[in-house]
Image (cartoon, helix red, strand yellow):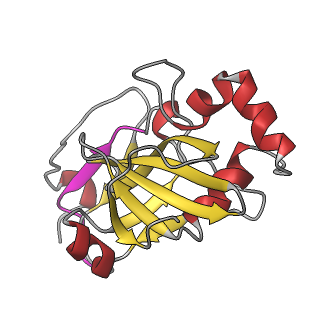
Amino acid sequence: MENEEDLPVTVTAVTTSMIVEPQAQKGAAVTQMTIKAPLPVEKRTVFGPSGKGDLGTITDEMAEKIECKAGVVRLLNGVEGRNSGYGLKHIEAKESRGKQIAGLGYRNVFAYVSYIAGGFDAIALQDDGRLVLIKRNGPYSHQCVCQWDEDLEIWSVTTSIPMRRERDLKIVWGAEWN
């Protein structure tokens, strides 16, 4: 039998720090490995104190009805930016938003986003293909804007905001707000 070190290896990506995943069944000799680059910090999932990272789900049924992809909803670390920002850094960058969220009784942005994504009442579709998850409570329409991340195959939270009215949203799943 050949020594495993002598078997050919296919390298699909190279970085300075690499994660190696063998591509063989248990007990079989490894003949191919995929080397994946680690995720950039901004693409990493934010986890809650309990280790929860998947905050909600766009189910197959919902996805079929609204003609989008099914998948989990996650809050990523993200980046700041007025027009190109997303995720935790983007939401936290606006100080007034943090004060508004805290004023509603949420410990932090993660708790607020978890509340919405974990129990939304409706979904709206924006012209750019982003989804708006809506959780209605009292006078507020709590909203998370999500976009599909092709690399991670998830719905990534772009931003989140409590609103007293629902702007001109096209509701595609769930009930209209009276």
Whether the magenta-drawn stretch holds residue 74 is answered as: no
Q: Nearer the viewer, residue 141 or 178?
A: 178
As drawn, the residue found furthest toward the front would be 178
Numbered disc total: 0
Whether the magenta-drawn stretch holds residue 33 is answered as: yes
Image-based side of 104 in relation to 23, left or right: right
- Splitting the image into 4 quarters, where does residue 120 fall? bottom right
Q: Magenta stretch?
A: 28-38
Above or below 9: residue 117: below
Residue at the (49%, 18%) spot, across then down? 81
Residue at the (43%, 39%) spot, across then down? 39
Residue 29 visible somewhere in the drawing: no
Image spot of residue 57 (x, y percent): 45, 70
Q: Nearer the viewer, residue 44 or 138?
A: 138
Above or below 116: residue 40: above
Image spot of residue 155 (x, y percent): 39, 54
Image spot of residue 96 (x, y percent): 74, 25
| Quadrant for the N terminus in the image | bottom left
As drawn, the residue found furthest toward the top would be 82
Residue at the (61%, 42%) spot, across then down? 161
Q: Nearer the viewer, residue 45 or 178?
A: 178
Main SS, magenta region, reads loop
Residue 130 visible somewhere in the drawing: yes
Image spot of residue 48 (x, y percent): 72, 56
Residue at the (21%, 75%) spot, across then down? 64
